[in-house]
Structure formats: C-alpha cells, structure tokens
Amino acid sequence: MTYVARKERYDTMKYNYCGNSGLKISAISLGLWHNFGDANSHENSRTMIRRAFDLGITHFDLANNYGPPPGSAEVNFGRILRDDFKGYRDEIVISTKAGYRMWPGPYGDFASKKYLVASIDQSLKRMGLDYVDIFYHHRPDEMTPLEETMGALDGIVRQGKALYIGLSNYKPDQAKKAFAILTALGTPCLIHQPRYSMLDRWIEDGLLTLLEDAGVGCIAFSPLGKGMLTNRYLYGVPEDSRAASQSTFLKSEDITENLILKVAMLNKIAEQRKQSMAQLALAWVLRNKQMTSVLIGASKVSQIDDCVGALQRLDFTVEELDAIDRILENH
Ligand code: NDP
C-alpha cells in the first residue's frame, strides 16, 4: 500500500537549531548502523523508517560502511526512499559518512581526498540521491593533513553533493583546527557527532564548550549505550538483542553484574519520573543546551515509540541530576 505520512507528524516533535546554522534537526534522530543491512528484515526496516517519520523524526543517519554487508544500509534506505518517500525528500535530513574501511587497497579508508570524493559518489549512487544533507568525516586520521581532508569536504559541498559538513569522533584539539580550516574555506562545520551517554561522558571535558564557542551543533551517538541504558538487559540477555548477537561492538560479556546494578538504580529514578529507562537516558543527554539531537538505534518500532516519548519529560531537578551522578560515579 502507498505510504502516506501522518498529518500530525510535526505536532509533538521538538526541533533544535543546529549550532549557529539555520538548519533545525529533530531532537531524536534515527541511525541505520544496525538493523538496516541485508541481513535484516527489509519489511521491519521499512516499518521503522515510516514510523520514525510519522512521529516527526526528520533526520536519518547513515555511513558508507553500515550493513552488513557494508553499503547495504544505504542501498536499503535508498529503496525505502524510492518506494515510500518520493514526495518527502525536502522534509528529510539525510547524512552519510566516510572514514572507515570501505573497499580494499590504500584508497578505501581514512581521510585522503581520493577516498572521500569516491566515497560520497558511491553513497549517492547506493541511495539514489543527487545530494546528502550532511556529509561527515567519520574519524580523525593522524596521517593525512587536515588541510587535505577539510579541502575535500569543502569541495564536495561546492559540487552540490552535500549541503553541510560534519565531523565525527574528533577530539577537541583536532576539532578546533578542523573548524578553523573549514571556516576559512567558507564551509563552516555544521555539526559534530561524538559518542555520549551516561556511560561515556568524555565530551563534558572540553568538547561541549568548544562546540558552543564555535557555534557548531552536536548529535550524540549511542545515547542508550548500544542498548545497555534501557530495560533490555535488566533480567538477562534476550535472544533477539544486540548483545546476544555477539557483535564486535557489544557482547554478552559486556552485560556485567555491575552494569545491571547501576542500570537498576537508574531505572528507579526513571520510574519516579514516570519514564522508561531509555527515556531517562535520552532526556539526560538532551539536558545539555548544546545538544541538537540524540541519535538512537532501534530494532523494533516499539523502541522508536518509547524513545520519542522521552520528549514528554526533559526537565530535571538538581536532586535528580545529583542522584544520577552519584550512581554513575560510585558503581
Ligand atoms: P543506541 O545507544 O541508541 O542503541 C540502540 C539499541 O538500543 C537498539 O538497537 C536496541 O537494542 C536498544 N533500544 C533502543 N531503544 C530502546 C528502547 N526504547 N527500549 C529498549 N531498548 C532500546 O545507539 P546505537 O549504538 O545503535 O547508535 C545509534 C546510531 O549512532 C547509529 O545507528 C549510527 O547512526 C550512529 N553511530 C555513529 C558512530 C560514529 O562513529 N559516528 C558510531 C556508532 C553509532 P537491540 O538491537 O538489542 O534491540
């Protein structure tokens, strides 16, 4: 059946300006790192994208290597766009990235102009797009001069293949230099994509201040700690979970007693706030004023519904924040 987006989709979602730019991004964004590859059910992927859009999520995040196999998330997303979203391209912010290994040999990885230009062309072809909204350099590379990488990104914008540039996983000193080069070239960096959650607070040590000073937006990836900051593992490791799949990035061994103890205590605070654990974790990330959006992953439509529900209660009392800090520090 032809998909028609819900009329009320913009009524309850929150949209934040991305840094000093004029681009607004939904406070919740959906990432396609997991669950959108050829190994997954296409119908489930399609239903999740439709539901996300129906709830007001306008931003979908990809990368050249998402799958498995690498590239298949972009191909599958392109198919969903063609099948369901023909009239909606101008309502959607699509990002992709290059920086990790994508094809064999010296030009399929890292940060050279040769790699980045080829990669954006491949991504556009896989998704069937003329342009992406945001093109990211996925990870910093000590071996390639920053001038070359930033020059390549600027060129990609000038060629109309991306509207904006983002950087991911750059530490504050690297980000600061890169921002200066991009600004001098006339393509200021739009957004930084770091990992940030209750389990990993490194960006509080300098990066957030830098982003505020530079007027660059921030979108936190893995805000649910890949699922650890939800009720998913409170009573064991479910068979259909990421940890059970023994992925390179989350294994059942990572679900330690100590982690469960911590999450159970946090979950008590969530219950007092009438939130799910996932909603508490997302609201906590969004408490930072520089945070443009939280970039969630999902394996089921019900998880997207639950995550969007976080927006109903974003405020925290000082006592709640202190109690959360104590749990995170002491366990
Ligand atoms: P999350 O921390 O949001 O973890 C997502 C997982 O949490 C889901 O797959 C699901 O686990 C579980 N989950 C989600 N919602 C709920 C809920 N409401 N209740 C219970 N469980 C829930 O993020 P990801 O690690 O998936 O990363 C999100 C996105 O960030 C990626 O898709 C990608 O776009 C981006 N990213 C970027 C990186 C970079 O280097 N720039 C690196 C990593 C991610 P389950 O599958 O077990 O059901």
Image (cartoon, rainbow, N blue to C red):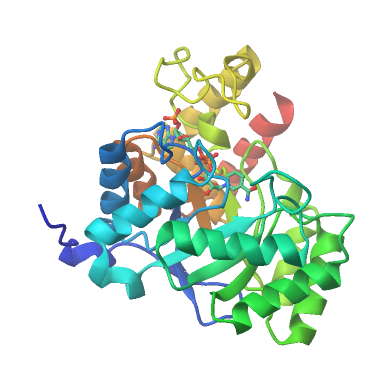
- Specify whether residue 289 is in view: no
User: Looking at the picture, how far across and down is residue 263, in whole percent?
Assistant: 55, 26
- In percent of width and height, residue 168 lies at 68, 56
Q: Where is residue 199 in the image (x, y as percent from the top left)?
A: 65, 36
Judge left or right: residue 148 versus residue 238: right
Please name whichever residue, 195 or 242, is drawn nearer the observer in this view of the structure: 242
> Extreme left residue here?
1
The percent coordinates of residue 233 (x first, y second) are: 48, 20
Q: Is residue 68 above or below residue 77?
A: above
The answer to which of 15 and 60 lies nearer the viewer is 60
User: Vertical placement of 130 versus 76: above or below?
Assistant: below
Residue, x 56% and y 52% (percent of image)?
Answer: 63
Label total for image: 0
Q: Is residue 149 left or right of residue 264?
A: right
**Residue that extends furthest to the front in the rendered view of this protein:** 105
Left or right of 106 on screen, residue 194: left
**Quarter assignment of residue 113:** bottom right
Name the residue at 54% across, 28% down. Answer: 228
Q: Is residue 329 above or below residue 78?
A: above
Image-quadrant location for residue 93: bottom left
Which quarter of the figure has residue 254? top right
Can the viewer see residue 315 in this picture? yes
From the image, which quarter does the C terminus lie in?
top right
- Is 311 left, or right, of 216 in this rendering? left
